[in-house]
Image (cartoon, rainbow, N blue to C red):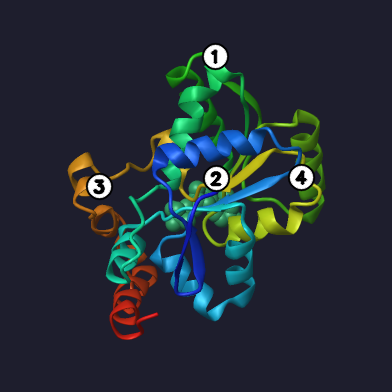
């Protein structure tokens, strides 16, 4: 099924709900090529204003979902509303939840050495029958990278989740897309830290109110510099109508 696209500051988002995004991912599994899913928030949309390489990567992706309330609010302000926020973490969770019954396999790449192992174990506990085809931490050099790519390709996973922070993970996926043998690749930021239990997602009430960013700021004040992109994003939305 073809979904409508909505452009926010040069980034074309797919007008999809979480469920529709998952349906689209299932379609990708049926096509014999490596697909890329990106989940930009307003920080990344702002970064893409100055980084044309990143902008190109986002717009070439097979699916672009809005992982941030800022992007959803901007879409409403422009009068072309996105149906809801589709957090990368939630899409990944949906994929993991359904994977055992559907027989989908997963490869995890990213996070600190002990963390990715812990995340894999917790996922297998939470979703019995889940097939983790392989995993590797996200701190590697060029030589190790070759071996990691070999590991991924011999596992031929349905899903490759890359958790190295945005936009590093998106750039890594893009630059290797022609040699990666995985049906769907998606950057998932700090999600493995959440699965491993070393960071927490905001409580549901924060998420419902669109205040997950605020919760993260309180928990990790070092994010303040990165988060200054949010007010800059808001000002740009208000004054630079598209
Ligand atoms: N990370 C990594 N390799 C790197 C840099 C970071 O695997 O070279 C991991 C890091 O351990 C953490 C994640 O990437 O698990 C970044 O999380 P963060 O919350 O900063 O990402 P965001 O969700 O904000 O993009």
Task: Residue at 50% x, 28% y: name it.
Answer: 96
* Residue under numbered circle 3: 207
Q: CA distance from mark 2 to mark 1?
A: 23 Å
Labels 4 and 3: the sequence-earlier one? 4
**Marks 4, 2: nearer the viewer:** 4
Of pointers 3 and 2, the one earlier in the residue sequence: 2
Q: Which residue is mark 1?
A: 129
Residue denoted by label 2: 111
Whole-Å distance between the Cαs marked 4 and 3? 34 Å
Q: Residues within 10 Å of mark 3 (few under 14, many from 20)?
A: some
Residue 225: x percent and y percent? 36, 72
Identify the element where label 2 is drawn.
loop
Q: CA distance from mark 3 to mark 2?
A: 24 Å
Work out whether 127 lies above or below 75: above
**Cβ–Cβ below 8 Å for labels 3 and 2?**
no
Q: Which mark is residue 180?
A: 4
Check disc 1: other Cα within 10 Å, few if <14, some if 14-19, many if 20+: few
Mark earlier in primary sequence (4, 2): 2
Gap in angstroms between the C-alphas marked 4 and 1: 25 Å
- The residue at 47%/66% (across/down) is 44
Q: Is label 1's Cβ within 8 Å of ligand 1? A: no
Residue labelled 2 has its Cβ within 8 Å of some atom of ligand 1 = yes
| Residue found at x 76% / y 49% | 145
> Which is closer to the viewer, label 2 or label 1?
1
């Amino acid at each position: 099924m073809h979904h409508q696209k909505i452009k926010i500051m040069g980034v074309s988002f797919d007008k999809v709900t979480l469920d529709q995004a998952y349906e689209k991912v299932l379609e990708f599994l049926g096509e014999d090529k490596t697909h890329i899913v990106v989940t930009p928030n307003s920080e990344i949309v702002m970064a893409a204003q100055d980084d044309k390489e990143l902008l190109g990567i986002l717009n070439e992706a097979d699916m672009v979902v809005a992982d941030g309330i800022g992007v959803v609010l901007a879409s409403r302000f422009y009068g072309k509303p996105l149906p809801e926020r589709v957090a990368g973490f939630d899409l990944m969770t949906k994929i993991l939840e359904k994977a055992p019954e559907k027989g989908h396999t997963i490869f995890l790449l990213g996070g600190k050495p002990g963390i990715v192992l812990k995340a894999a174990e917790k996922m297998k506990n939470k979703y019995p029958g889940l097939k983790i085809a392989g995993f590797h931490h996200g701190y590697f050099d060029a030589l190790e990278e070759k071996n990691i790519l070999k590991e991924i390709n011999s596992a031929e996973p349905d899903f490759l989740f890359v958790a190295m922070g945005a936009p590093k993970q998106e750039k890594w996926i893009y630059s290797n897309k022609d040699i990666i043998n995985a049906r769907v690749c998606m950057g998932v930021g700090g999600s493995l830290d959440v699965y491993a239990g070393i960071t927490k997602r905001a409580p549901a009430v924060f998420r419902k109110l669109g205040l997950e960013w605020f919760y993260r700021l309180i928990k990790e004040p070092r994010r303040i510099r990165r988060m200054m992109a949010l007010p800059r994003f808001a000002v740009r939305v208000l004054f630079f109508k598209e």
